[in-house]
Image: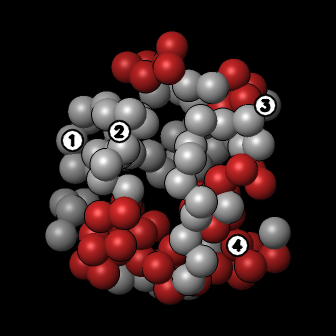
Amino acid sequence: MLAGTQLWAQEGDPAAGKTVFNKCRACHEAETDKNKVGPSLLDVMDRTAGSLESFKSRYSANMREAGEGGFVWNDENLSDYLRDPKAVIPKGKMVFPGLKSDEDIANVIAYLKAEPKP
C-alpha cells in the first residue's frame, strides 16, 4: 500500500496520538502490559505479529501465521494496518475499520513509540 509506505517516514505528535488512541482504548491498552479484548500495545514497535506471550492463545490463526512468516510491527506495517486492518491481516479478529487520516496514523504511531507516554 503506497500511502502507508510514504506515511511511515512522517513525524507524528505523541500527545495528539494519545487523543486519537482513545478510539482504540476499548480493546487495547498502550500504557501497561494489560490485555483487553485485544493485546496490550505497550512496546508493540518491532514486535513480531502474534507473539505477545500473554495473548498468544487469543490471536487469530492469520495473525500468528503472519508473525511466523516474519511480519514485524514497524512504522510501515503498522501504518498500513492502522489504515485498513483487514487488508493486512484478512482473517484477523480486529473489527475496527481503520483510521483514514495520514496525520492520525502518524500521531498514533508516535504515541506508541513514545517513552514515557505523554
Location of residue 78 by image quarter: bottom right
Q: Percent from the top left, x then y, of residue 29?
A: 29, 46
Using the image, determine if residue 68 lies above or below residue 80.
Answer: above
Determine the CA span between mark 2 and mark 4: 23 Å
Using the image, determine if residue 113 lies above or below residue 28.
Answer: below
Instruction: Identify which amino acid the numbered label 4 is placed on.
Output: Gly
Q: Residue furthest top?
A: 57
Q: Name the mark on residue 112.
A: none
- Report which residue position mark 3 lands on: 69
Determine the CA span between mark 1 and mark 3: 27 Å
Secondary structure, mark 4, is helix
Reading the chain from its start, which is encountered first: label 1 or label 3? 1
- Residue ID at (45%, 67%): 109
Q: Percent from the top left, x then y, of residue 113?
A: 38, 62
Secondary structure, mark 2, is loop
- Report which residue position mark 1 lands on: 32
Reading the chain from its start, which is encountered first: label 2 or label 4? 4
Secondary structure, mark 3, is loop
Secondary structure, mark 1, is loop
Determine the CA span between mark 4 and mark 1: 27 Å
Q: Viewer-nearest of labels 1 and 3?
A: 1
Instruction: Identify which amino acid the numbered label 2 is placed on.
Output: Ser
Q: Nearer the viewer, residue 49 or 9?
A: 49
Reading the chain from its start, which is encountered first: label 2 or label 3? 2
Q: How many marks?
A: 4
Q: Name the mark on residue 4.
A: 4
Reading the chain from its start, which is encountered first: label 2 or label 1? 1
* Residues at circles 3 and 4 in contact by the CB criterion of under 8 Å: no
Which quadrant is the C terminus positioned in?
bottom left
Determine the CA span between mark 3 and mark 4: 20 Å
- Residue ID at (24%, 33%): 34
